[in-house]
Image (cartoon, rainbow, N blue to C red):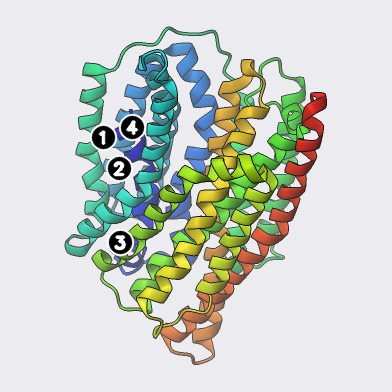
Amino acid sequence: MCACVLVAQSLVAAMNLAIPKIAASGLHPSPAQLLWIVDTYVLVFAGLLIPAGALGDRFGRKGVLLTGLGVFAAGTLLSALANGLPVLLAGRAVSGAGAALLVPATMSVLLHAAPPGRTAGAVAAWSTAAGLGGMAGNAGGALILQYLPWQALFGAYVPLGLALLAWVAAVAPRVPRQTAVLDLPGSALLVLGATALLFGIIEGPGLGWTSAAVTGAFALAVVLFAVFVRHGLRAAHPVLDPRLFRIPRLRAGAVGIALTFFGMFSLFYVNAQFLQYVKGYSPLQTGCAIVPLALGMMAVTTYGMRWAQRAGEARAVGGGLVLIAAGLLLLSTADAGTPYALYLAFLLVMSVGAGLAMPTLSHAIVASVPARRSGMGSGLQGAARELGAALGIAVVGTVLSVRFAAGTGHGAGTAAAFTDATALGYRIAAGAVLVVGGAVVAGLRTGARSAPTGG
């Protein structure tokens, strides 16, 4: 189960390393199309996580897990064989659907298989595997892209997915089915609303922020999310009950998780390009340069919850978000002459912040959800994480493309223009983390005050 979730998460990180090769390939993608190549997987992954959990309850977790692995392998095969942008985007979407099917099922099967008294250790191992996915994606993707074309990155996931499918079929136990109602209209509204929002952000620079397509996309996103909330309030078994967001601690936890991943994926999308374009690193050097970030994050995560118990959730999360913003601001000062040791120190500031914030925010969500809705709470956490990542990629990628085009248009060298664009993207992301982070901390404090009275 840990291997399955590690592989699904690793594709998110590995994809960022492939951007320079895809940009220089015969596909000739525009900056906006590059963003869609990255974000399509994350968007579908996020939008289908919650309904995929209900699907496993209704039709059997092992069967859904096997289906997810098969769909994931098929999507990566389609991506590897893509001879045009539409096919590549379709492959990314199929892969994201497969990942959404398999990730919730891995946790369910794992909890069922774990011996009594060992469930806490099993969950810790699963969480560690999810974190290791980013490091594995960077290291493995770097090794592949150093010597092979970008198609080989997707091709490598095909045998991985099939091998995991055979392994799961042979050893995973069948979990008893539970009664579950699939909220297909709610799921569709959630995915379509997020897609409309991302379309407006990504396509704004190319089509014009005041163009009918972009303003229409933003308006459509507002309408779809409003209908989603209305549907959730009326449905007997909604994919996500909006009433849960009346709980201050849960609301703050969900927004905080999304914000943490917004900041981290703002870094991940730009970092690999910066190291290759500006610093002149090879794909292998780039992958190895990023690995300490994941190691630092995992090391701090072990102690994050302990510190939160002593200092309080609000202080732990507030400190973590401030460090993420500080890391982004420090990275905005980097240029071609910045020594790697100093650059690594900036990355580690961010990793410490993420390690402090993430476990506390995850616990805030899980502890706030009634026991009968624990599955929805887990799905909400995953969806918030992936939607935050998708928004981080979209926002910083859009800033990057606009500023880079303006810089080269005014005669600046390619490396200098890219450095300037990267700095602006990091500063905007840092500002968003600080501003929204203040609301998250306030929500956690409100939740702490209301908790004794059952709020």
Tell me how far mark 1 sits from mark 3, CA to CA: 22 Å
Neighbor class of circle 3 (other Cα within 10 Å; few <14, some 14-19, many 20+) is many
C-alpha separation, residue under disc 3 versus residue under disc 4: 22 Å
Q: State the separation of the CA atoms marked 1 and 4.
A: 13 Å
Crowding at label 2, few (<14), some or many (≥20) Cα neighbours within 10 Å?
many
Q: Amino acid at mark 2?
A: Thr
CB-based contact (under 8 Å), mark 2 and mark 3:
no
Helix, strand or loop for disc 2: helix
Query: How many dots with numbers?
Result: 4
Q: CA distance from mark 2 to mark 4?
A: 20 Å
Q: Position of residue 446 (x, y in %)?
A: 80, 40
Label 2 vs label 3: CA separation?
A: 21 Å
Q: Which residue is under mark 1?
A: 161
Q: Quadrant of the N terminus?
A: top left
Q: Which mark is residue 287?
A: 3
In the rendered structure, which disc, 3 or 4, sits on the residue that comes first in sequence?
4
Residue 99 locus on image (x, y percent): 40, 35
Whether 111 is drawn above or below 200: the answer is above
N-terminal-most mark, 2 or 4: 4
Asked whether the viewer can see residue 390, the reply is: no
Residue drawn at x 54%, y 66% is 327
Circle on res. 76: 2
Question: The C terminus lies in which quarter of the figure?
Answer: top right
Q: Which residue is mark 4?
A: 2
* Tags 1 and 2 touching, CB below 8 Å: yes
Query: Distance between the Cα atoms at labels 1 and 2?
Result: 9 Å
Quadrant of the rendered image containing residue 451: top right
- State which mark lies toward you, 1 or 4: 4
> Element at badge 1?
helix
Question: Residue 11: percent from the left, percent from the top?
Answer: 35, 47
